[in-house]
Image (spheres, coloured by chain):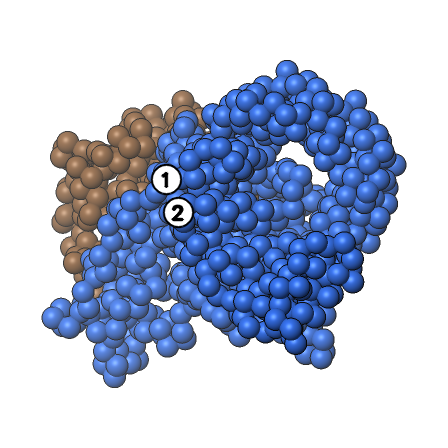
Chain colours: A brown, B blue
Amino acid sequence: MALRAAVVVLCMAMFALAADPLGTDLNGHPIEQIAPPGAKAVVLFFAASDCPISNRYIPEIERLDREFAPQGVHFWWVYPNPGDTAAVVRRHYEQFDIHADAVLDTEQRLTHMAHATITPEVAVFLSTAEGLREVYRGRIDDRYVALGRERPVATQHDLETAIRAVLANRTVPKPGGPPVGCSIVPRNAP
Amino acid sequence: MRFLRCLSLVLVCCVFLSRLNPSRAMRAAEAPVTWSGQIASIVYQNCATCHHPGGSGPFSLLTYRDAYRRGPQMVQATQSRYMPPWLPAQGYGDFSGARRLSDEQLRLIRNWVESGMPEGDVSRAPAPPHYDATWQLGKPDLILTIERPYTLAASGTDVFRNFVLPYPLALAHYIRAMEIRPSVPQVVHHANVLIDRTASFRHRHPGDWEDGVPGMELEVDAGNSFDPDSHFLFWKPDTPVLEEPEGMPWRLDVGNDLILNMHLKPSGKPETIGAQIGLYFTPEPASKHPMLLQLEDDRDLDIPAGERHFVVQDELKLPVDVDVFGIYPHAHYLGRELEGWAVLPNGQKQWLIRILNWDIDRQSVYRYRDPVFLPRGTVVHMHYVYDNSENNVHNPNTPPIRVRAGNRSVDEMAHLWIQVLPINVPKGGPDPRLLLEQAWMEHRVDRNRGDFISLYNLAAALAGLGRYTEATADYRKVLAAHPDDERALNSLGAALENAGDWQEAEEAFRRAIAAGRETCDAQFNLAGLKLKRSKFGEAEQQFRAMLRQCPEDAETDSGLGVALDGEGDSKSAEAEFQRALELDPGDFTALYHLGEMAIESGPPQRAIDLLEKATAQRPDDADSRERLALAFAESGRPGDALTQLGEAVQLKPGDANLHALLSQVLAGAGQLQRAIDEQNQALHLQPNDADGWNNLGVLEARAGKTAAARADFRHALQLAPDHVQARANLARLPPP
């Protein structure tokens, strides 16, 4: 009971902060809104410049971005770790030749909003008149079963399936397994 | 959207509160585990060799901050024993460099992360290890570099690629150590270096070898002489430099290629893959000759789709005592349990290795802390289990399909290599590696009558053991199936020649020449046969014909030189030997014959220079040592002459003439008793040598042993009643 009460108090407090930006772009400009007008769905790709598994998924996320952007799916590359500053991410973008929209999740608001804990991990939000509704969160595909247990190629493309379901107004299946990668670092890390 | 934010906060609160779970907090209080106190030393000893800036690990773990960043993954990776990478089960082989963490270390890492990863007293933290980017053993004697770097795609399946690095030097060298430095070590899972003695891989890929050739495994042509693979030249991310045991360097000859086989893992961005191989020479040739033996069962690899427990096995009985230095189990993605063991002649089972969760990504060569002794008669076993079901996450085929042996990652393999050093080798007996080769190839042929490569290798081993009749029979079996196989015809010719059947040998060489496109070997052998039979004119013609076909071959020029010398044209012969040395400064025949010519007519120092180079090329050649001894003797260096003759006698203990020559030089150096001993040894080997008995008599007489001398001269006269010197010497002895 005591726990429940505490949560309510904190939630009330968040209401007051609602006007804060969700994060900043690579030039330090605040990002207030992640669903562009007309977007059917928003995908947040939680990435880390220093996470090898996250990096290995870059080509796959770019593939999905290319395929689904024309259908109204907007992809954001969200960098939640305190070490991934604008300068670090800019270098990461250069190294990996990334051209997608980046969000520095400096306050980890998007992380909390999506309940993400790992990089790489994705969240899919359905854009509705009432706001955004999370319909999928978890792994991108089944290539990594656990650290050190890896398929030669993915056999289930969970994120792609989720996006297709959203676009077809079907129920989105849950991920077939947990995300595998690097923990998202708390904001107060040393 | 606001509502959703509130929901997320509920979760955050729960996570926050769970961290204050009292039981966990209590446990942490009982045993405060901190970075400075316990964790840093575990990480430095077991993780940092790869996980340091610029290292092969994907991130560094040198600082508290680094470790804090990776804490939860450190728990996952270590508890599942994914890290540090170490596949062998404990207690099934005592390996050097074992990386397995103890249960206590695992518990400490877990407790540290659960208690919030405290740093502890920084002043108590161990100093982090220092790594630099230079060659581990200093600048190598030779650095080979991949000419054309390869671009690894950003994504996709793993890539297996073979890069050819030709050995560029004009002299052979023994290699005591090697360091492989991939340009992007983070994407290289492991690498193997193969020695291609005949540059066969390059010749098979004339158009693309410079760009690298795809393939997980490769076969190279070992050439015509028995020169088995001897060393595991294997690299994995925590292998800084490969140093060979004392007396066991490996050899690179002129014209050899090194082939670097790399297993590459896409990183998410295109990577430019280059590599350097640093080689460290030793002037000391190998004094110990290990050999790699392979157990395998590729032929039985035919795994039905969905099969969860498919077993293949092999066994090999050892014909000689060996020490096992290392072991290399190998399968692809379906392998699950890989076991190797030995059953000793007394029935005792000795484990060599056991891997219960095979993972090709973490494969390795394993080297024993102390060599494992396996006596003659031991049977080595390989027992592998494959899982071709959907449950095997490594399965490259979805849904599973029937899988057989092959070179692609979707195929399978069942190999167990062991590095053995024959020991307790009887003096004067055959090369024990030939006995191992014979046993190995007989076993392979028994398993598969259609394996003509093994049958050919068996015949070659038998020929090497001097069993020419059996070798000839096996070569003929190979030829029954492959009548135009140039190499088998050529080897048959050589075996027949050694068996003394030179007519049949000549016929075989001629058939080889007719059958082959690259006929230089058989032509060379035919010319050599003519030389041995002193048909110098025919040999000259044969060599000249060869020169038109193989103009850049030093051995052809030096062979022609020998033929011309035999015909009495020493001037032309010398020119050919010189030409041979221009093509290959290490051509033994040219060095030897020019050295011999210099003994006769040149300054002794020139003879010494040439013959020293010749003996460096073939340290085991007694004749060149004998000639070198002569050159030393002529230039007034009896001590050096004695050393060379001593070596020659060691190499050919059954050569009576060498003992007799050594006796003469010893006598000249005033070592009379040793001279008598050597002459006795010569006569023991060649008892009907009247000159030898006369010489022994002279030595005995000089030593004041008149009675013995008299008996020796009489012995000489018994063998040769007309021996003038023996008669004169006998007459000169004081009366009894």
Find the residue positioned furthest to the right: B480
Residue visible at 26% across and 30% down? A94
Q: Position of residue B724 (x, y in %)?
A: 70, 54
Circle 2/circle 1 CB separation < 8 Å: yes
The Cα atoms of the two marked residues, 2 and 1, are separated by 8 Å
Q: Position of residue A24 (x, y in %)?
A: 18, 37
Q: Chain of mark 1?
A: B
Residue visible at 23% across and 78% down? B32
Q: Earlier in the sequence, mark 2 or mark 1?
A: 1
State the residue position of label 2: B281
Tell whether B461 sits left or right of B352.
Answer: right
State the residue position of label 1: B142
Q: Secondary structure at mark 1?
A: strand
Q: Position of residue B324 (x, y in %)?
A: 57, 65
Is residue A178 visible in this depiction of the protein?
no
Q: Chain of mark 2?
A: B
Residue visible at 58% across and 54% down? B661
Other-residue count near label 1 (Cα within 10 Å), few / some / many at <14 / 14–19 / ≥20: some
Seen in the picture, residue B557 relative to B133 is either above or below; the reply is above
Other-residue count near label 2 (Cα within 10 Å), few / some / many at <14 / 14–19 / ≥20: some
